Image (spheres, grey):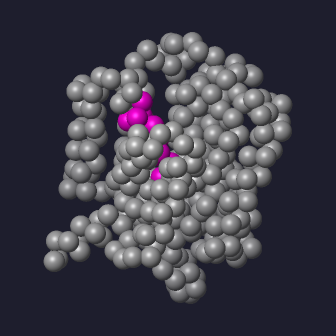
Amino acid sequence: MNAKELFPIVLFAVLAACVPIFVTAGTWLNFAVFTLIICLAAQGWNILGGYGGQYSFGHAAFFGTGAYLTAILQTKFGVNPYVGFLFGIAAASMVGTIIGFLSFRSGLRGSYFALVTLAFAEVLRVVSNAMEITGGAAGILITLDVRVENFQFTSRAVFYWVALGLVTIAMLLTLALERSRLGAQLVAVRENENAARALGVDALAVKLAAIALSAAITGAAGALYAQYFLYLDSTIAYGSWISVEALLAPIIGGAGTVFGPVVGGIILHSLSEFTKSLVGRIPGVDLVIFGVLLILVVRFPPRDIPGVIRAWRKR
């Protein structure tokens, strides 16, 4: 990586860090924090789906694992929240590796892989809804104890900067992957797995590395969600909503690019809130809008916002 490649990320981080200086309303800061959590989860999906071409419909499995483990370690075992946060990321990565090994070892690709990931996420949702350690259907509540050492802050702005820092780190990791040998092999597997194998690429190892990193980043988003909202249940942690947003944001913003998940996440979450403000808090209305967007994006090229801009500039 060189200074020219790092400059857009640094500029974005600096400009975004100034938002709480000018926006102090709690509602808007809450919107910004949640948007960044979505962007972080989407960046995780982007590594596996955008760069690796392995479209997952079940990234909720990683989001929920990161969220639940950090919450359980705090509430049931008294583990420090920062340590629990790291364990949540590690657990999500482990779950991703297990799912990836079972799927890729069996040669699952395309829609088969997508459906398998969706099935794993749904199984985890059902299991977490029935287990006592997760609070069952009632969910799990993290005790409110506003102290820095407890990963709880008096100001939403601090949470915003933490979320922004994690998004920035994820973008830097994505850029490093893009410029690395692993990234080149991952793209080769995406374009033609059989040809990549013929050239000596260990496709299984490459895809396992991608899903482990992808799951870790999405798990970090789940752990941050738990720390910010202090409540989880199976529908929140392993619900289809996060899988849909994590998948759709990179597709809208530009899959296989560093800024795609951020651009898509901001657009999607803004559109969701705008729609809710128009029609009211009707359950599922945002998912309906996302579904329509996905159909339009898949049906009509160019298939992402950068593509639309490039087409417009050519005209």
- Residue 104 versus residue 232: which sits nearer the camera? 232
Q: Is residue 295 above or below residue 47?
A: below
- Residue 33 versus residue 14: which sits nearer the camera? 33
Q: Residue at x 52, y 49 (%)?
A: 285
Where does the C terminus fall, quadrant-wise?
bottom left
Specify whether residue 234 is in view: yes
Where does the N terminus fall, quadrant-wise?
bottom left
Q: Residue at x 70, y 21 (%)?
A: 75
Q: Is residue 166 above or below residue 80?
A: below
Q: Residue at x 83, y 39 (%)?
A: 130
* Farthest-out residue, front: 279
Q: Is residue 32 magenta?
A: yes
Residue 192 % position (x, y): 52, 83
Q: Is residue 79 above or below residue 237?
A: above
Q: Residue at x 63, y 16 (%)?
A: 143
**To which quarter of the image does residue 14 belong?**
top left
- In the figure, is residue 211 to the left or right of 3? right
Q: Is residue 126 magenta?
A: no
**To which quarter of the image does residue 79 belong?**
top right
Tell how many labels. 0
Specify whether residue 62 is in view: no
Q: Over which residues does the magenta segment extend?
A: 30-42
- In the figure, is residue 90 to the left or right of 313? right
Residue 241 % position (x, y): 58, 49
The rendered magenta stretch, by its main secondary structure, is classed as helix
Residue 215 % position (x, y): 58, 51
Residue 24 % position (x, y): 30, 23
